[in-house]
Each structure stands twice: as C-alpha cells, then as structure tokens.
Image (spheres, rainbow, N blue to C red):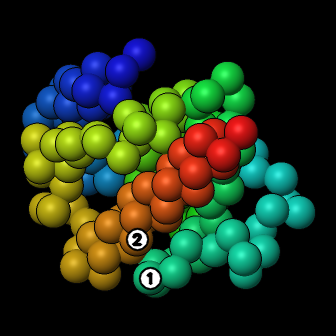
Amino acid sequence: MTINQTQDQIISEFSLLDGDMEMTVFYIMELGQKLPEMNPIDKTELNEVKGCQSKVWLTANIENNGLQFSADSNTAITKGLVSLLVRIFNGQSPDEILSADLYFMKKIGMERFIGTQRSNGFASMIKQIKMYAVAFKAQLTAN
C-alpha cells in the first residue's frame, strides 16, 4: 500500500469514531497495543527520539529497498501515535518517505486530542523517520 492509501485508511477508521474524544484516545491506545514488540536491546539512549516528553524508541533497517521500523514508548498514547507512523512508513522506500505529504493528522483532527507537548514529540518522530530515510538513501546510492 502507498503512504497515501494508508493515510486514507487511517482517516476512514477515525471517521467511524465521529469525533468522540474519549473513543479516539482509547482507539489510539489500542493501536499502540497492536504494535509489534520491540527488541529490548534496541531500547537504548541512542535509539531514543529526542524532543519527546515520553520515552520513544525508534529503529529502522532496510529490506528490499523499503524501510522497516520498530518502535515503542513508555506511555500508551504515545505508543499509539508512533504506531500510526510505523504503519504509514513501513515498507516504503527512502524517496517515498522523504517526499511524503502527511495529511492524516489534520483530517482526523489530531490537534484536538493531543496537546502541544505531544504535537512537538510527534513532529520529532516524523523528523527521526525522515533522518533514517536520508541515511538509508545515502547508503543505497553508495552501493
């Protein structure tokens, strides 16, 4: 699935919640519970996303020219938020990640249910994902 197809799918899922704040937050936490377990060895300071109030760990590797992300957080909501990004970007090429236009946040009204601190942390997660894409793109062009 493309990045936009995945975003559209997420928008569709959130539209079923009809803007109910409590249900939306619960759903985000539920998504976090479905995030594949991250290897505890990877939960290091080196893999910590800087700029997040909560602890968020994010790693990436490349398989078949697509990035595969692994992530975790010490809080349920943040884990749910990072799970959305992993879902959107997993399997995508560095170029697709770098040129992605993320519009799902605005469409689902994310700013209504995450505060400024989490918004800043979410932006830091996106920035980290794009930094991985830059690094793997350089690696691919060097080979």
Observer-nearest residue: 73 or 88?
88
Mark 1 in CB contact with mark 2 (< 8 angstroms)? yes
Q: Amino acid at mark 1?
A: Gly
Residue 124's disc is: 2
Seen in the image, is 88 located left or right of residue 91? Answer: left
- Check disc 2 and report its element: helix, strand or loop: helix
Q: Amino acid at mark 2?
A: Ser
Ranked by sequence position, the earlier of labels 1 and 2 is: 1
Seen in the image, is 134 located left or right of residue 62? Answer: left
Residue 51's disc is: 1
Q: Name the residue located 88 percent from the left edge and 63 percent from the top edge.
A: 41
Q: Residues within 10 Å of mark 2 (few under 14, many from 20)?
A: some
Residue 43's disc is: none
Q: Position of residue 79 (x, y in %)?
A: 53, 57
Q: Position of residue 125 (x, y in %)?
A: 44, 63
Seen in the image, is 72 located left or right of residue 13? Answer: right
Relative to residue 10, is residue 113 depicted above or below? below
Please identify the residue farthest to the front as the structure is shown: 142
Seen in the image, is 94 located left or right of residue 72? Answer: left
Is residue 31 in view? no
